[in-house]
Image (cartoon, rainbow, N blue to C red):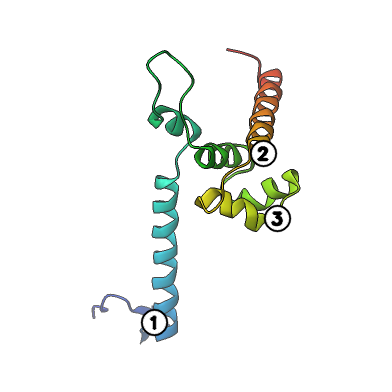
Amino acid sequence: MPTTPIGTEMQSGIISTPSVAERRAASRERRIAIGRAEFAAAAPTGQTLVAEAGRSGNGAPPDVDAAVELRAVGTLLYGRRFVTELAEDLGEDPRQVRRWLSGEATVPPRTLAWARDEARKRAREILRLVGEA
């Protein structure tokens, strides 16, 4: 019985090898999957951000950068691709939100206060739905 080399298939008795386009497509899919896995592993959760934030010695709330906090709240409220939805709810341009997140511009206190209020509202809604533990 003849053996087929790795990467070939038997189709109606004919040995075929993947075309260049098929190999490129398979390689592209592998790279995309690896990139998504690395992104998911690197994406911080809100709990991680708070845990990593420095606390002052008197038990004050965590000292978190406004952009980091806005990113955490946006991610938890809207998911990984939160910028456009957050910008719409804020009445801002998505590019402006990206500037805040990159540190190009400072996050206005009013915006951060709104984001915190929205996070608290969502937390209350979830607790009403599932009950408190």
Q: Secondary structure beneath disc 3?
A: loop
Q: Please identify the quarter of the rendering in which residue 27 is found.
A: bottom left
The x, y position of residue 54, in whole percent, is 39, 27
Quarter of the C terminus within the rendering: top right
Which residue, given by chain and number where applicable, does mark 3 sit on? 93
Choose the circle earlier in sequence order: 1 or 3. 1
Q: Amino acid at mark 2?
A: Thr
Q: Which mark is residue 18?
A: 1
Query: Residue 8 versus residue 100: which sits nearer the camera?
Result: 100
Taking the spot 44% from the left edge, 83% from the top edge, the residue there is 21
Q: Amino acid at mark 3?
A: Asp
Q: Residues within 10 Å of mark 1 (few under 14, many from 20)?
A: few
Q: Nearer the viewer, residue 15 or 116?
A: 116
Q: Is residue 53 left or right of residue 81?
A: left
Q: Earlier in the sequence, mark 2 or mark 3?
A: 3
Q: Is residue 69 above or below residue 43?
A: above
Q: Kindly check if marks 1 and 3 are in contact, taking CB atoms under 8 A apart as contact.
A: no
* Neighbour tally class for label 2: few under 14, some 14-19, many 20 plus, Cα within 10 Å: some
Please tell me which residue is depicted at 64% across the width and 42% down the height of the picture.
78
Secondary structure under badge 1? loop
Position of 122 with respect to 47 (left or right) is right
Count of labels shown? Answer: 3
The residue shown at (69%, 49%) is 87
**Contact check, label 1 and label 2, Cβ < 8 Å:** no
Q: Which residue is mark 2?
A: 111
Quarter of the image where the N terminus is located: bottom left
Q: Position of residue 101 (x, y in %)?
A: 54, 49
- Percent position of residue 102, x then y: 51, 52
* Amino acid found under the numbered disc labelled 1: Pro
User: Do the residues under discs 2 and 3 have CB atoms within 8 angstroms?
Assistant: no
